[in-house]
Amino acid sequence: MNKQTKILLIIFLIIIILLFLTRHNENLNEKDDGEKCKEPSDCKSGKCKEDGTCGYVGNDMKCANDSECTSRLCNTVTNKCIDVLEDKEKCTRDSECNSGMCLTTVVPNICHKKLQPDEECIRDAECENKSCINKKCQNKIVDKSVQDCIADIQCQSGICNQVTKKCGLNDVDNECNRHKECTTGYCKTKKCTTKPSN
């Protein structure tokens, strides 16, 4: 190794060490929750509150989005951090509720357990069976039953044949609209067929 190569190698090592020390010092300057800050980058949490201290915002304090709150829930109506809500408490969205559902069929919206079959609903997510048809929660339809379906979500198998309006997979030569409606996984010209060999 010649003298010029050694000098370049030493310069390179010095640059690497300086970069490491600079980054290490930046991390040392980051403040813990509760310490004074001017901007989010001053804080280890990346959060600088309106009162000029590092950390997440507590309940009943002003927030703009979920990520600012200790609870990770910012009420979009009041713009205040909230705890997870229990049944019958006012809500604006599903994630605010312990039950996972903010019932929108009542005014005001309230947290509520999932709805049972025949209860009034607006959307699939409100129903225990995740099936809201004609504004009523539905039981899942057993495959190959005589009951008609209109959507995959109504069926226990998750498949509603769009031609026959029956739940479940169809065998070869039965009618289909989609590949997933056939036991073979292949639908051609509205009939379940075997997959062609390539």
Image (cartoon, rainbow, N blue to C red):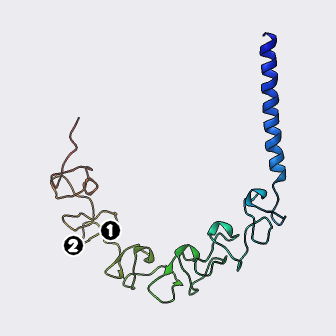
Residue 189 drawn above or below residue 138: above
Question: Residue 168: x percent and y percent?
Answer: 27, 62
Which residue shows up at 80% across the image and 27% down it? 13
Q: Residue furthest top?
A: 2
* Quarter of the N terminus within the rendering: top right
Category of crowding for the residue at label 2, using alpha-carbon neighbours closer than 10 angstroms: few (below 14), some (14–19), many (at least 20) = few
> Residue 54, located in which quarter of the rendered image?
bottom right
Q: Which residue is mark 1?
A: 155
Question: Residue 183: x percent and y percent?
Answer: 26, 53
Amino acid carrying label 1: it is: Cys
Question: Residue 150: x percent and y percent?
Answer: 26, 71
> Residue 159, located in which quarter of the rendered image?
bottom left
Is disc 2 placed on a helix, strand or loop?
loop
Amino acid carrying label 2: it is: Val
Is residue 154 or residue 61 the one in the foreground? 61
User: Marks 1 and 2, Cα distance to the nearest angstrom?
Assistant: 12 Å
Please name which of the two marks, 1 or 2, marks the residue nearer to the observer: 1
Is disc 1 placed on a helix, strand or loop?
loop
Q: State left or right for residue 38 relative to residue 191.
A: right
Which residue shows up at 78% across the image and 57% down it? 42
Q: Earlier in the sequence, mark 1 or mark 2?
A: 2
Is residue 177 or residue 156 the one in the foreground? 177
Which residue shows up at 51% across the image and 77% down it? 101
Q: State left or right for residue 3 relative to residue 117.
A: right
Q: Residue furthest bottom?
A: 107
* Quarter of the C terminus within the rendering: top left
Residue 66 drawn above or below residue 119: above
Q: Which mark is residue 3?
A: none
Category of crowding for the residue at label 1, using alpha-carbon neighbours closer than 10 angstroms: few (below 14), some (14–19), many (at least 20) = many
Q: Which mark is residue 146?
A: 2
Decide: marks 1, 2 in contact (CB < 8 A)?
Answer: no
